[in-house]
Amino acid sequence: MACRDNGVHTALETCGMADWETFRELAPHVDLFLYDIKHMDDEAHRRLTGAGNRRILDNLMALSREFPDLPLQVRTPLIPGLNDDPAGLEAAFAMLREEAARGADIVGVELLPYHRYGEGKYRQLGRAYPCGAEPYTEETRRRIESMLDLRVYNSFGMSEMNGPGVGIECEAQSGLHIWEDAYILEIIDPETGRTL
């Protein structure tokens, strides 16, 4: 509350799994919700994450209806073969279009390339890591662009880091550009260990 009272923009990133009363209590103190939707199908969500998605979707709809002026940025990490099917994505977009038509402030939808940062945690738990971490292939990019009638850009970020991510493609879509105002790039020769 002190941040917002002092003019600091406050964003809350969530998977939506908390109880509704927690969201109701926090919402007046937040300027932006970054809200993950990993899958629209409850059983597929359970296979992917170990939990169903009913509470997550109910909380998203309750937030958008009880706090219609609160900006919601919806984010979906696309995991090849697990949640990138056109029917599932269209179901999510249909729900978001419906909430926006009811007055929700859906400020954007980010389709994020998936990363492998959880791999070490899975290894420590003795579990197989079910997901890969690659930028969109050109085939996937074209499919999403065709399905949604928009441009798709690869980006690279880390949840442990601030801001827009480490790098993103430009209009040319020919490789990632580092956010040079936030990061210093150091290239090291893997053979010698020397900085290039």
Image (spheres, helix red, strand yellow):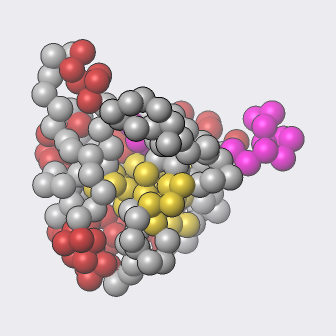
Task: Give the residues in magenta.
Answer: 1-17
Where's residue 176, x and y in %?
Answer: 44, 60
Q: Residue at x 17, y 64 (%)?
A: 85
Residue 182 belongs to magenta span:
no
Q: Nearer the viewer, residue 34 or 65?
A: 34
**Is residue 59 toward the left or the right of residue 69 in the image?**
left
Residue 71 figure quarter: bottom right
Q: Nearer the viewer, residue 186 or 104?
A: 186
**Is residue 24 toward the left or the right of residue 9 in the image?**
left
Q: Nearer the viewer, residue 4 or 149?
A: 149
Q: Residue at x 64, y 62 (%)?
A: 69
Q: Residue at x 61, y 43 (%)?
A: 184
In what quadrant of the picture does the N terminus appear?
top right
Where's residue 117, x and y in %?
Answer: 34, 34
Q: Residue at x 25, y 77 (%)?
A: 142
Q: Nearer the viewer, residue 56 or 175?
A: 175
- On screen, residue 86 above or below 80: below
Where's residue 28, x and y in %?
Answer: 68, 45
- On screen, residue 164 above or below 26: below
Q: Is residue 21 visible?
A: no
**Is residue 16 toward the left or the right of residue 92 in the image?**
right
